[in-house]
Image (tube, rainbow, N blue to C red):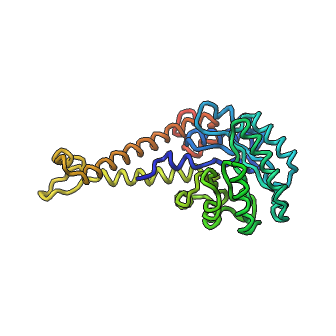
Amino acid sequence: MSLSYADLAKMIDHSLLNPSLTAADLNVGCQLALAYDVASVCILPYYLQRCAEILRGSSVKASTTIGFPHGGHTTAIKLAEAKQALADGGQELDMVVNISAVLSGDWDYVRRDIKAVVDAAHTAGQKVKVIFENCYLKDEHKIRLCEICGELNADWVKTSTGYGTSGATLEDLALMRKHSPPHVQVKAAGGIRDIDMLLKVRQIGVTRCGASRTKEMLDEWRQRAKQIHDADDEPVERPDGEAAEQGEDQARRGAGDNDEDSELDRDHHAGQDVRQVLEHDLRVEERLCEAGPARHRSACGGSRAQCR
């Protein structure tokens, strides 16, 4: 496999924004994000401080939303939200543009609105993702927003909140990547529900994806990696009828067999990646069991003592 587990896990912002999530759900979600070592947790603002405490010392960032989900808050309110989020330990802020102002063509207002949040975050050494909510916009709006975000040095442009009439599309992502300068990354949100879609958007140049199905997606990747590893370990039949592991051929190779050596190197690295990702299984079980045995019992089947 040319991609490692980390390549994909570090694309995912684990989304915990459903308003019906309880505090216990949010805690379990943070533990899951830690166990799967994703890029960030994007969480309901009121729980951000606790989220930051849980994630402290890890490589998983604490993030939340600003002006969510409709973007119609005044700039002063968005700025107050941003300052509170930064004080609570937020490292990445996902802000929604003022959609009404965008559709009205009031680009000066739109620019000031975005700038206020971007400047506040950057002053604190943190980052901002600017949500367009593309389902309500025409291509001309999306392009102009990409240009403004580039001029203001926003860190990401983002397709959607996940709560509009539709989410990310491959066409929109390609458009946003094309019209954003290299220093602005692209995030997909809404509709990234399986590993195949994650791989497709990565090919376009997307570096982050909002996802609530994090466990299912990364478990699927690990299963595929394991299957490839198992297939590589299948014995091969020699002409004399004896079975031998493929790795035994290395002892008979000459120093000049560069192509075969390269293939062995690839197999070695693939094996390393499989071992790396499978080691996550135990950490996932431990994290989720610690977060709440009753909640995790259905997932692990009570196999761990503390879940019985």
Q: Quadrant of residue 37?
A: top right
* Most foreground residue, 40 or 207: 207
Screen quadrant of the C terminus: top right
Could you say where residue 98 lies in the image, as x and y percent from the top left? 82, 56
Q: Residue furthest left?
A: 240
Give the left or right position of residue 235, taking residue 1 as reference: left
140 or 35, nearer to the observer: 140
45 shown above or below 227: above
Number of disc labels: 0
* Residue plotted at (60% across, 42% down): 33
Q: Residue at x 16, y 48 (%)?
A: 254
Where is residue 128? Give x, y as percent.
Answer: 70, 46
Name above or below for residue 218 compared with residue 292: below
Q: Is residue 261 left or right of residue 299?
A: left
Residue 25 is at least partly visible in this image: no
Confirm whether residue 304 shows in the render.
yes
Relative image position of residue 192 (x, y in whole percent): 61, 58
Image location of residue 204, percent across then percent down: 55, 61
Q: Is residue 55 left or right of residue 103?
A: left
The foreground one among 44 and 72 is: 72
